[in-house]
Image: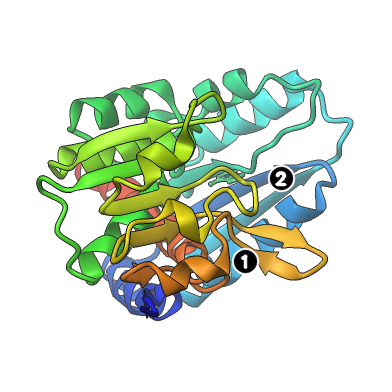
Amino acid sequence: MTAIVMDGKALAEKVRAKIAEDVAALGGLGLATVLVGDDPASHIYIELKHKAATAAGVRAVDVRMPEATSEAELLAKIDELNNDDTVDAILVQLPVPDHISEDKVIRAVAPEKDVDCFHPSNVGELALGSAVLIPATALGVMEILQEYNVPLAGAEAVVVGRSDIVGKPAAALLQQANATVTVCHSRTKDLAAHTLRADVLVVATGRPGTVTADMVKSGAVVIDVGINRTDAGVVGDVDRAVAEVAGMMTPVPGGVGPMTIACLLENAVRCARLRRNG
Ligand code: GUN
């Protein structure tokens, strides 16, 4: 079997066209991004987010702060953006430098402007199934599954990786869609025993080769969240040979990555609506 390719790039283009309409209907919106320091990957991600935002008619406020920025200076900048009426949504690119507490930064962003959905009050809403904002990558995973009509009610869903940004919210959303969810992680004893049972397998470990063809059930739907830069180019967390076993699979690049950025903009629209309509 050769898996059907789940084309996240094409879906993201559709989603972004709809977002452009929503932004125009709102009369524009402001998204502030804050990048502290010199992490090369973070610079690439911020450029991609700005390009997509601008293309959708979103006004991007580009805040860049040097590596030596103190925690107090960054928290003061976030406070300024929280109180800026022209800013609907705020994103502080992670990781922040080691001398700054990530937890304090996440808690400093006003929950109604928290486009990443990282603030504990938004994480709590998500856990309760009453979320308005949903972390962009997890939302992107769900929108790809929906686009390809993957049945989730009663399905065995296995999530590999338990990060706050992807694994945990993806598991919560799959459960809310009535899948039976197993979460695996670095201390799981027999990973293959779990992955082989999956009808839907979501892999988000940041490690190439986490899942190989012998670990996947024939016909399973495989969502590869990994984006790893290697000597062989950009690869996911799932071996490409899995496409010979899976029924459907996201490619890397061109799968979940483009949907993360589109869903970030969906959240920016939600932030703007929240602030304007209460
Ligand atoms: N760093 C890696 N992924 C993300 C993300 O989704 N949002 C932010 N703010 N930082 C990140």
Viewer-closest of 183 and 269: 183
Viewer-closest of 213 and 61: 213
Q: How dense is the environment of label 1, judged by Cα within 10 Å: few (below 14), some, or many (20 and up)?
A: few
Q: Is residue 114 among what the camera can see?
A: no
Mark identifier at residue 48: 1
- In the image, residue 146 sits, relative to residue 133, either above or below, namely below
Q: Quadrant of residue 50?
A: bottom right
Instruction: Give the x, y percent position of residue 160.
Output: 45, 40
Which residue is at 26% across, 50% downward?
A: 273
Label whose residue precedes the other's in the sequence (2 or 1): 2
Q: CA distance from mark 2 to mark 1?
A: 13 Å
Instruction: Give the x, y percent position of residue 102.
Output: 64, 24
Q: The N terminus appears in which quarter of the rendering?
A: bottom left
- In the image, residue 7 sits, relative to residue 220, either above or below, namely below
> Where ligand 1 lies, by image quadrant?
top right
Amino acid on which the number 2 mark rests in the picture: Leu
Q: Quadrant of residue 126?
A: top left
Label 1, secondary structure: give it: helix
Instruction: Give the x, y percent position of residue 245.
Output: 39, 68
- In the image, residue 126 sits, relative to residue 60, either above or below, namely above
Kindly give the residue lying farthest to the right in the view shown: 68
Label 2, secondary structure: give it: strand
Mark identifier at residue 35: 2
- The answer to whether residue 81 is left or right of residue 75 is left
- The answer to whether residue 145 is left or right of residue 195 is left
